[in-house]
Amino acid sequence: MPVRAEIIYARGTKVTVSLPHLKTFGTLYGLLECYLIEPVYLHDKRVMLVDEEGLLRKKPINHAATAIAGRLIVGDVAIIAGKDFK
């Protein structure tokens, strides 16, 4: 079943995409330009998927994602509904 995701780029732009599924993170690895994904659980029951190695790889601060998460977030992120993340 397709999953809607909001991609928030560190440069400040946002797009909504439809992912075929989340059984594997292959599509997300490409969209977020990463190899490891870390879930950040948001207060509104959504899940922000971030590059687990973003700080090590010196990715830029994502100010919009940082404001949403309430903690420092670097690099591009994807936000999905909590029900879609299992």
Image (spheres, grey):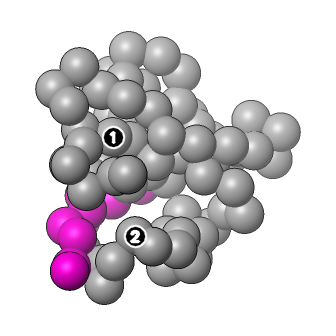
| Helix, strand or loop: magenta stretch | strand
Most extreme residue toward the front is 86
- Give the secondary structure at mark 2: loop
Residue 78: give x, y in percent of width and height: 38, 54
Q: Is mark 1 on a helix, strand or loop?
A: strand
Q: If the image is split into quadrants, where does the N terminus sit?
A: bottom left
Position in image of residue 17 (x %, y %): 24, 74
The answer to whether any part of residue 11 appears in the image is no
Residue 76 visible in the current orientation = yes
- Above or below, 52 relative to 7: above
Query: Is residue 1 or residue 32 the one in the foreground?
Result: 1
Label located before the other in sequence (1 or 2)? 2
Is residue 48 shown left or right of residue 51?
left
Q: Where does residue 35 sit, x and y in percent of width and height?
A: 72, 63
Q: Which of 71 and 36 is in front in this view?
A: 36
Task: Name the residue type under label 1.
Answer: Val
Lateral position of residue 7 relative to residue 38, left or right:
left
| Point 24% across, 43% down: residue | 82
User: Which residue is identified by label 2?
Assistant: 22
Tell how many labels: 2
Image height of 9 relative to 24, above or below? above
Q: Is 59 included in the stretch rendered in magenta?
A: no
What amino acid is found at the position of numbered circle 2 in the picture?
Leu
Q: Name the residue under label 1.
A: 47
Extent of the magenta region: 1-9
**Image check: 27 left or right of 57?**
left
Q: Of residues 12 and 50, which is closer to you in this image?
A: 50
